[in-house]
């Protein structure tokens, strides 16, 4: 028996996670009351990731910029372009599927208790205020825009520091990375707790009445993950994109699916980028930035639920309005919080484009919370895995150009 347990620890992390998922489902089925208590493991794992992620990003960005060689190209501009392009493309896919398979909702008010931003200006204003947040507060509150801003600032300021100072910064970054590695090794136990408690508490029988809506949402996300992202990756690298796509979905997407937090998955993506031998100067900035602005899954959620409300109310939508909705959804998604359910509160903003009353819009938000177990998990998996895909795409394109 002991040798079998030891053998489990010799398996790859992904295989351990898959076994944990199966074990969690089995426990929820056999002993649901015990499975609910397993949420302790999941909560500890997610809390540990959320706690270490801002500090990791802060020290890695400082170290990467301070130790960057003069002729090194971090390739951040094309990464940002891909993030924005991918988010807009995701919104277009959602619009197309919503037109092909129109959804209508049985609107209800339960769960709509949070305040939502009223317009694009408010979303952008909030983003700007996050940029100038106190650096300590930014780390404490996981404000990754602020963490990135101050990390870049300190990194630039320390570029001309002594080699000893730079080495100390590099050693600190390495120490924090080792702590992250230890936390990630507990992913199988954490995901076991998350799966067991989720199945025992919610299950999927309650989703039956929302199958049409979920089919459009998950179908849109699947198209982006398996068609749009591979097409972009192939265009950038001129290589078969699917091995990398499946690796990112397997090693980043699975963890993100169960943590339901792009911010919490940053350390996982950092480890994956390191494993893929991507440029550290690039991924140390692009991964936390992607957790903030690369929100294709959020754009899909905003678009599909908004058009579902429009169809329910019998509002006609022409092509120019649909394109405008895609733009608004993409911009709004960039301001979505990197935590569970962050995109749902931006639905009223998109609904306002069609003159939909805020009270009705918040009922749509409530519907989003009802299906959130699947919707938000799949959304986060798409968002987080795409961060690595686009970072790798730019790295491969740069390598191809260098070789040529």
Image (cartoon, rainbow, N blue to C red):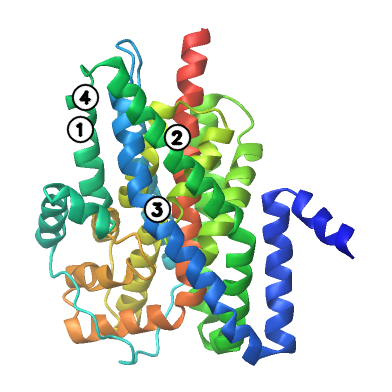
Vertically, is 243 above or below 158? below
Number of marks: 4
Residue contact at pointers 4 and 3, CB within 8 angstroms: no
x, y (%) of residue 34? 65, 88
In this view, the residue farthest toward the top is 404
Residue contact at pointers 1 and 2, CB within 8 angstroms: no
Which badge, 2 or 4, is on the more N-terminal residue?
4
Most foreground residue, 183 or 172: 172
Most foreground residue, 119 or 76: 76
Which badge, 2 or 3, is on the more N-terminal residue?
3
Residue contact at pointers 1 and 4, CB within 8 angstroms: yes
SS for tag 4?
loop
135 horizontally vs 363: left or right: left
SS for tag 1?
helix
Vertically, is 276 above or below 69? below
Residue contact at pointers 2 and 3, CB within 8 angstroms: no
Q: Which residue is mark 4?
A: 158
Vertically, is 155 above or below 100? above
Give the label on residue 174, or none: 2
Q: Which residue is mark 1?
A: 154
Which badge, 4 or 3, is on the more N-terminal residue?
3
Quadrant containing the N terminus is bottom right
Task: State how far apart marks 2 and 3 are (Cα).
Answer: 13 Å
């Amino acid at each position: 028996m002991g040798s079998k347990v030891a053998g489990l620890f010799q398996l790859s992390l992904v295989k351990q996670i898959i076994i944990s998922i199966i074990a969690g489902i089995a426990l929820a089925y056999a002993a649901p009351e015990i499975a609910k208590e397993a949420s302790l493991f999941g909560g500890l794992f997610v809390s540990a990731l959320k706690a270490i992620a801002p500090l990791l990003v802060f020290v890695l960005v400082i170290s990467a910029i301070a130790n960057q060689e003069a002729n090194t190209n971090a390739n951040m501009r094309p990464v940002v372009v891909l993030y924005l392009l991918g988010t807009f493309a995701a919104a277009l896919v959602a619009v197309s599927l919503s037109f092909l398979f129109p959804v209508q909702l049985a609107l209800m008010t339960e769960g709509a208790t949070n305040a939502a931003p009223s317009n694009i200006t408010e979303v952008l204003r909030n983003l700007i205020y996050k940029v100038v947040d106190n650096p300590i507060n930014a780390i404490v509150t996981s404000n990754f825009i602020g963490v990135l801003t101050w990390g870049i600032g300190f990194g630039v300021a320390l570029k001309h520091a002594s080699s000893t100072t730079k080495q100390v910064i590099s050693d600190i970054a390495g120490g924090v990375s080792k702590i992250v590695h230890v936390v990630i090794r507990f992913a199988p136990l954490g995901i076991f707790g998350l799966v067991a408690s989720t199945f025992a508490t919610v299950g999927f029988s309650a989703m039956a009445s929302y199958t049409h809506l979920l089919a459009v949402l998950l179908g849109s996300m699947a198209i982006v993950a398996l068609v749009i992202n591979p097409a972009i990756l192939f265009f950038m690298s001129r290589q078969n994109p699917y091995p990398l796509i499946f690796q990112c979905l397997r090693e980043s997407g699975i963890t993100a699916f169960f943590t339901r937090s792009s911010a919490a998955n940053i350390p996982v993506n950092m480890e994956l980028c390191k494993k893929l031998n991507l440029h550290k100067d690039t991924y140390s900035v692009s991964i936390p930035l992607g957790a903030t602005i690369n929100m294709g899954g959020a754009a899909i959620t905003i678009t599909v639920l908004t058009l579902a409300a429009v169809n329910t109310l019998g509002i006609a939508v022409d092509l120019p309005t649909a394109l405008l909705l895609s733009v608004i959804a993409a911009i709004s998604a960039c301001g979505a919080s990197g935590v569970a359910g962050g995109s749902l509160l931006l639905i009223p903003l998109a609904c306002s484009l069609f003159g939909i009353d805020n009270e009705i819009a918040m009922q749509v938000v409530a519907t989003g919370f009802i299906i959130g177990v699947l919707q938000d998990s799949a959304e986060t998996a798409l968002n987080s895995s795409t961060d690595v895909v686009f970072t790798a795409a730019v790295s491969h394109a740069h390598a191809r150009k260098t070789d040529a």
